[in-house]
């Protein structure tokens, strides 16, 4: 019974599954929402000192008429905390900027 409780209980705040982010298209200004499932999508890599980290690349496109591709690259540590992020074709928007 304890196993079923663990499987079907909602995640606690520190066990969040998705990293959500907002970007603004550099061409048309449209706001696009994105998310990364931090336990399934990132790929494991090793740095020059053989320390593990995770990388996830996403290509986003808005729903308007622009069709500009916005590429984001996230780098996570082994606890799935964001170490670094890069963007091409847009800019990251922080909470409250939208």
Image: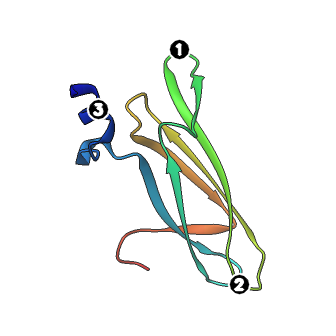
Quarter of the picture containing the C terminus is bottom left
At horizontal 29% and vertical 32% (from top left) the residue drawn is: 4
Disc nearer the start of the sequence (2/1)? 1
Give the CA distance from mark 1 to mark 3. Answer: 40 Å
Disc nearer the start of the sequence (1/3)? 3
Q: Secondary structure at mark 3?
A: helix
At horizontal 54% and vertical 14% (from top left) the residue drawn is: 50
- Is residue 11 toward the left or the right of residue 86 in the image? left
- Is residue 90 toward the left or the right of residue 13 in the image? right
Kindly check if marks 2 and 1 are in contact, taking CB atoms under 8 A apart as contact: no
User: Is 47 placed above or below 21 here?
Assistant: above
Disc nearer the start of the sequence (2/3)? 3
- Residue under numbered circle 1: 49
Quarter of the picture containing the N terminus is top left
Return the residue nearer the eye: 18 or 24: 18
- Residue under numbered circle 2: 64
* Image x and y of residue 21, in percent: 47, 62
Figure quadrant of residue 45? top right
Q: Residues within 10 Å of mark 1 (few under 14, many from 20)?
A: few
At horizontal 50% and vertical 46% (from top left) the residue drawn is: 37
At horizontal 45% and vertical 58% (from top left) the residue drawn is: 20
- Residue under numbered circle 3: 4
Give the CA distance from mark 2 to mark 1. Answer: 44 Å
């Amino acid at each position: 019974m304890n196993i079923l409780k663990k499987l079907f209980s909602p995640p606690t705040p520190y066990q969040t599954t998705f990293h959500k982010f907002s970007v603004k298209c550099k061409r048309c200004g449209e706001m696009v929402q994105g998310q990364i499932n931090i336990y399934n999508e990132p790929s494991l890599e090793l740095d020059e000192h053989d320390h593990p980290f995770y990388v996830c690349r996403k290509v986003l496109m808005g729903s308007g008429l622009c069709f500009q591709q916005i590429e984001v690259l996230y780098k996570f540590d082994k606890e799935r905390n964001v170490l670094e992020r890069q963007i091409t074709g847009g800019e990251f928007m922080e909470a409250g900027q939208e």
